[in-house]
Image (cartoon, grey):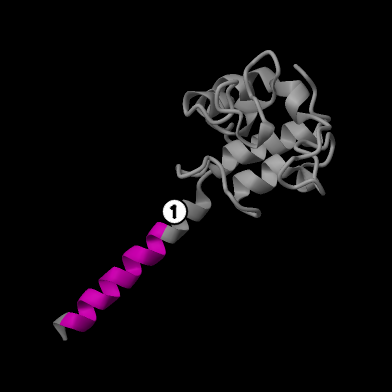
Amino acid sequence: MKTQKMIRIFLLMLILSLIVSCSEDQTTAPAPSTNTSLSKFSEIKAKVFVNCLGAQCHSSSGNQGNLILEPDVAYNNLVGVQSVLFPQFKRVEAGNSANSLIIKILKGQVSPQMPLNGTPLPAATIDSIAKWIDLGALNN
């Protein structure tokens, strides 16, 4: 009898928590760390590529996959450039994030997933990079 009561209380709490979470206002503006914060290439360089350089993977000295993401050369090394490792893809195909290798690698659709041996980027960050690409991959 006591177990049934506890199960009912648990189920009631679970249902209430689902109702509350589903009824929260979904129209509020996203936090600064979500996709709106990386709408410009300059922001992507400053907030994402800095990690690629710090690990010495995509710096002049690391140059993994023949890809350097240092601020002065990152754009020209990404947009419209065929991948060395996956020549069937451009690293960034302006206007087409679904066919851009950077998105495939960040999402783990091809291996190795980036960041290599690190925690994958949050989905919101990847989505913001995809949005930048879909909007034409401007050098802004």
- The type of residue carrying mark 1 is Val
Outermost residue toward the left in this view: 2
Task: Indicate the position of residue 12 as horizontal and vertical percent values.
Answer: 34, 68
Q: Quadrant of residue 124?
A: top right
> How many labels sit on residues?
1
Task: Indicate the position of residue 22 as horizontal and vertical percent values.
Answer: 51, 54
Q: Is residue 81 above or below residue 24?
A: above
Q: Which residue is mark 1?
A: 20
Q: Nearer the viewer, residue 37 or 87?
A: 87
Q: Nearer the viewer, residue 21 or 114?
A: 114
Task: Indicate the position of residue 108 as horizontal and vertical percent values.
Answer: 60, 52
Q: Nearer the viewer, residue 16 or 113?
A: 113
Q: Secondary structure at mark 1?
A: helix
In the rendered structure, which segment of residues is drawn in magenta?
A: 3-17
Name the residue: 84% across, 32% down. Answer: 80
Q: Is residue 94 above or below residue 50?
A: below
